Image (cartoon, grey):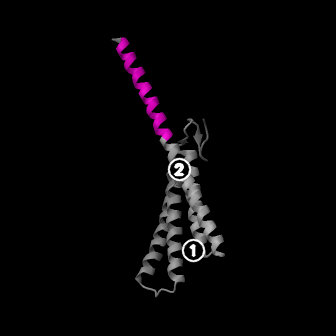
Amino acid sequence: MKWADNSRKRMHDGANSIGNLLVEGFHYLGLFAIGAVTAWASVMAFTGMIDKGQASVDDILLLFIYLELGAMVGIYFKTNHLPIRFLLYIAITALTRYLIGDVSHHKAPDIGLLYLCGGIFFLALSVLAVRYASYRFPSSKAIDASGEYVGDNVTEK
């Protein structure tokens, strides 16, 4: 019966290794695809501004959204953790971009303006809450794909 247990363990270890390889391969393929699409979209937006001969604040905020998306992909690639703060920053920038576009087209102010400002305010409070929570209750050490500890709070290996 010992041979059966050893065979089962070898089969389990082999299946686990193959499964990890496929999951990590899909993970990296997805990250490269998202990074490439983000870079392509930012280049297309930039060339559109050059063709137009000017850049509005709305266009510049769009480039900031692309920059934040690229930074988020980079951090996720290095740490295998998705920083929720970056998603909140992107949402704040997107709402600000929408607000500026709405106001710049001289649309008459209505209750939607208050909703946008309230959304930006609540997202800013969310950033504050997330930052406070991560300071007050730090998570465990992050480990990258190679098994090494990453981050600022690493004191030992």
Residue 74 in the image: x percent, y percent? Answer: 58, 51
**Magenta span of residues:** 2-25
Residue 121 image offset from top left, x and y in percent? 48, 72
Let me know if residue 98 appears in the view. yes
Which tag, 1 or 2, sits closer to the chain's start? 2
Looking at numbered disc 1 in the image, what kind of residue is underneath it?
Asp
**Which residue is tagged 1?**
58
Q: Is residue 6 magenta?
A: yes
Q: Is residue 5 left or right of residue 38?
A: left
Residue 66 highlighted magenta (yes or no):
no
Neighbor class of circle 2 (other Cα within 10 Å; few <14, some 14-19, many 20+) is few
Label 1 close to label 2 by CB (< 8 Å): no
How packed is label 1: few (under 14 Cα within 10 Å), some, or many (20 or more)?
some
Q: Which residue is mark 2?
A: 33
Q: In what element is the residue under mark 1?
A: helix
Frontmost of labels 1 and 2 is 2
In the rendered image, the residue lying farthest to the front is 51
Q: Amino acid at mark 2?
A: Ala
The residue sitting at 52% across, 44% down in the picture is 29
Classify mark 2: helix, strand or loop: helix
Q: Main secondary structure of the magenta part?
A: helix
On screen, 99 above or below 22? below
Q: Position of residue 5 (x, y in %)?
A: 36, 17
x%, y% of residue 6? Answer: 40, 16
Which residue does the image show at 48% across and 61% down from the upper left?
Answer: 129
* 74, above or below 47, in the image: above
Picture disc at residue 22: none
Q: Quadrant of the N terminus?
A: top left
- Structural distance between the alpha carbons of marks 1 and 2: 26 Å
Q: Is residue 128 visible?
A: no
